[in-house]
């Protein structure tokens, strides 16, 4: 069921291509920035406790990202199916595929929660947290609370994915802003309580703070408090999202019957979303491996790698957002049989980002040392800046081709060609990156520069391989297969993904 009118139905399949891409990408970029603010808030308040608490979060996050990637890949199936059914005009199917995605990912999240909770100590030990230490204990506590809240996290991600497929990126942005704001409010209280909480002083309520502390003696929950604040914030976002979906307050309108799983639809969701989950999981594993390789060089290199990645993650936000926009627009156009327009969408996105990153990469190479210097001061900073500047100067020149790869990858996902996207990502991108890094560091003793060179090489390799498959155009076969799509003269085919 939907609340769609005729004016909305052609907003991404007719007229100018640039504007629809920007309309989708703007809120998506803001949503990504809000997610960065989410993580920074946790780090800031936990940092008030001490270095061990921050280290505990640092060990926990790779595991959290790895577990989330399993659900994240599956939510892509919702985006793809919804976008293609919207383009095909199959309004009667939207509630069904949305509900099936929500129910299946919800069940998956329960399994992830159980496994994450049970094996948290072992998973943390694998990535370097020594069992029996304070850091390991804090990390286990934080990770277990976070994974228990995975159903809420997955639920919120499904909501965002479904709305993105429909073409609404503003509502998820508003909901993300709500959850970030709630986390900002809850974090200082759950982490520090009333004893050492500077928030009261900042807003001129120091006397109130002292009275509350005298009455309750509440000193917060420390690292566990940050996890609880995160779970509660995600829970509010997920519940509001469900209220919007089932109340018909957004374009999609779900009914309870849509949650009753049907084998054929679940098979399609797994067939489309499974490769994405593998792709994203491989990305997380590769990141852990590269960090371990950089660690063999020294702590200065690790710090530089962290700073460089932090900077790149901010610069890269528009690319992530534009890739998601391409996924939606391509999906809707292929669903409607507009193959040529789907191809033009990718060309336009590549032109926009290619121009932007020509400028961004040039400025980054030129100002590499000052950029890294913004993130680090004090004794030993020069060595970190040296490593970080070299990192940026080697990797930044490949941003243009990497941005092109991400646009093509977004098109692959929008078409439902997730197996192709996975194959390219696992082999040409993450596989080449990991193998080249190990080879250069271990065999040639090239140190951190070997890792930076492997990243640059993999960016170029992925772009070349991606372009090869993109211009074959087989990926434009779409996944909507219920006979509702007719040939519009654009050489589009209707075939179920296999």
Image: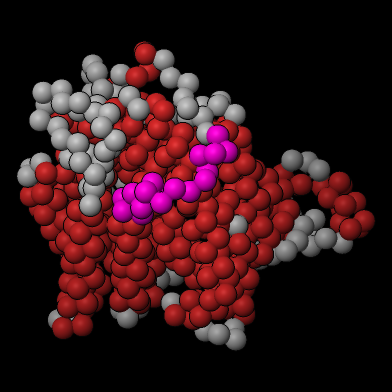
**Do we see residue 321 in this rendering?**
no
Q: Is residue 261 above or below residue 220?
A: above
Position in image of residue 10 (x %, y %): 30, 18
The residue lying at 34 percent from left, 49 percent from top is 268
Q: Is residue 496 above or below residue 25?
A: below
Q: Is residue 271 left or right of residue 209?
A: left
Position in image of residue 15 (x %, y %): 23, 16
Magenta stretch: includes residue 67:
no
Magenta stretch: includes residue 260:
yes
Q: Is residue 285 left or right of residue 146?
A: left
Which of 155 and 394 lies nearest the eye of the viewer? 155
Q: Is residue 388 above or below residue 167?
A: below
Residue placed farthest to the bottom in the image?
Answer: 132
Locate residue 300: give its quadrant: bottom left
Residue placed farthest to the top in the image?
Answer: 7
Position in image of residue 405 (x %, y %): 19, 47
The magenta region covers 255-272
The residue lying at 83 percent from left, 60 percent from top is 218
Which of 273 and 238 lies nearest the eye of the viewer? 273
Position in image of residue 379 (x %, y %): 44, 70
Number of residue marks? 0
What main secondary structure does the magenta stretch of the protein show? helix
The residue lying at 23 percent from left, 63 percent from top is 426
The residue lying at 69 percent from left, 53 percent from top is 188
**Do we see residue 302 in this rendering?**
yes
Q: Is residue 11 left or right of residue 449?
A: right
Residue placed farthest to the right in the image?
Answer: 215
Locate residue 57: give its quadrant: bottom right
Which of 222 and 408 lies nearest the eye of the viewer? 408
Q: Is residue 337 above or below residue 99?
A: above
């Amino acid at each position: 069921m939907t609340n769609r009118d005729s004016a909305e139905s052609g907003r991404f399949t007719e007229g100018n291509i640039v504007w629809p891409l920007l309309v989708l990408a703007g809120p998506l970029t803001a949503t990504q920035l809000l997610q960065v603010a989410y993580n920074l808030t946790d780090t800031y308040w936990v940092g008030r406790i001490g270095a061990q608490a921050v280290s505990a979060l640092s060990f926990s996050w790779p595991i959290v990202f790895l577990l989330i990637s399993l659900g994240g890949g599956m939510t892509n199936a919702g985006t793809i199916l919804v976008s293609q059914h919207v383009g095909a005009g199959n309004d009667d199917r939207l509630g069904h595929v949305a509900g099936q995605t929500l129910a299946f990912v919800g069940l998956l999240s329960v399994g992830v929660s159980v496994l994450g909770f049970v094996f948290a100590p072992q998973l943390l030990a694998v990535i370097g947290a020594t069992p029996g230490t304070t850091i390991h204990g804090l990390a286990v506590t934080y990770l277990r609370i976070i994974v228990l809240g995975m159903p809420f996290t997955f639920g919120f991600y499904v909501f965002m994915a479904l709305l993105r497929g429909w073409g609404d990126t503003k509502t998820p942005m508003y909901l993300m802003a709500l959850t970030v704001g709630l986390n900002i409010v809850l974090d200082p209280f759950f982490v520090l309580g009333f004893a050492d909480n500077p928030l009261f002083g900042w807003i001129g309520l120091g006397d109130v703070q002292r009275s509350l502390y005298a009455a309750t003696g509440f000193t917060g929950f420390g690292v566990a408090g940050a996890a609880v604040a995160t779970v509660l914030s995600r829970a509010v976002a997920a519940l509001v999202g469900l209220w919007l979906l089932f109340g018909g307050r957004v374009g999609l309108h779900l009914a309870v019957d849509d949650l009753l799983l049907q084998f054929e639809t679940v098979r399609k969701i797994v067939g489309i979303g499974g490769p994405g989950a593998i792709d994203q999981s491989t990305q997380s594993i590769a990141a852990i491996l590269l960090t371990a390789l950089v660690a063999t060089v020294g702590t200065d290199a690790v710090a530089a790698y962290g700073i460089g990645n932090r900077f790149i993650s901010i610069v890269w936000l528009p690319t992530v957002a534009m890739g998601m926009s391409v996924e939606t627009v391509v999906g809707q156009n292929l669903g409607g049989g507009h193959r040529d327009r789907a191809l033009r969408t990718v060309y336009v996105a590549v032109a926009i980002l290619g121009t932007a990153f020509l400028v961004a990469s040039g400025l980054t190479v030129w100002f590499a040392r000052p950029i890294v210097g913004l993130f680090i001061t004090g004794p030993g900073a020069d060595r970190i800046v040296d490593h970080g500047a070299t990192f940026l100067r080697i990797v930044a020149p490949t941003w243009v081709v990497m941005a092109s790869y991400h646009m093509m990858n977004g098109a692959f996902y929008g078409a439902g060609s997730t197996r192709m996207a996975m194959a390219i990502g696992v082999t040409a991108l993450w596989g080449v990156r990991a193998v080249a890094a190990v080879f250069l560091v271990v065999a040639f003793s090239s140190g951190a520069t070997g890792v930076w060179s492997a990243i640059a090489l993999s960016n170029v390799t992925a772009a070349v391989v991606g372009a090869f498959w993109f211009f074959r155009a087989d990926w434009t076969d779409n996944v909507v297969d219920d006979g509702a799509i007719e040939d519009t003269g654009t050489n589009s085919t209707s075939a179920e993904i296999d």
